[in-house]
Amino acid sequence: MQVSRRKLMARLPRFALAIAGADLLAERSARADALVSKDSVSYQTTPSNGQQCSGCTHFVPGAAGGPGTCKVVAGSISPTGYCLAFTAS
């Protein structure tokens, strides 16, 4: 199938917009996967009103009850810590 130069030039802007849109979606997805800082969620190493990281759905336990990680917050996370992202499991 041959496409005339005129048709190709007419379709080029739409093609460019489609590529740019895909790049924006990929960037937005990458930002969604990024972890937030401890400061941004007011992380503390002590429980708050009986709520602590070990009881949160985002907490990933470490070895032998030591520090673990979080699906939301970057860095090492204490099982007895707490932050504003706490979600009871």
Image (tube, rainbow, N blue to C red):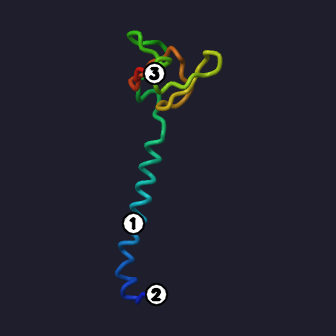
Name the one closer to the observer, 35 or 8. 8
Mark 1 residue crowding within 10 angstroms, few (<14) / some (14–19) / many (20+): few
Q: Label 3 is placed on what type of residue? A: Cys
Can you tell which of label 1 and label 2 is closer to the viewer? 2
Q: Label 2 is placed on what type of residue? A: Met
Relative to 75, 84 lies left or right: left
User: Element at badge 2?
Assistant: loop
Q: Position of residue 40 (x, y in %)?
A: 41, 30
Q: Quadrant of the C terminus?
A: top left
Mark 2 residue crowding within 10 angstroms, few (<14) / some (14–19) / many (20+): few
Q: Position of residue 77 (x, y in %)?
A: 54, 22
Q: Quadrant of residue 11?
A: bottom left
Q: Position of residue 9 (x, y in %)?
A: 38, 83
Label 1, label 3: how far apart the Cα atoms are: 40 Å
Can you tell which of label 3 and label 2 is closer to the viewer? 2
How many numbered marks appear?
3
Q: Quadrant of residue 4?
A: bottom left
Q: Disc number at residue 1?
A: 2
Which residue lies at the image location 46% right of the left edge and 15% below the top edge?
52
Outermost residue on the top side: it is 50
**Which residue is tagged 3?**
56
Q: Label 1 is placed on what type of residue? A: Ala
Circle nearer the N terminus (1, 3):
1
Label 1, label 2: how far apart the Cα atoms are: 22 Å
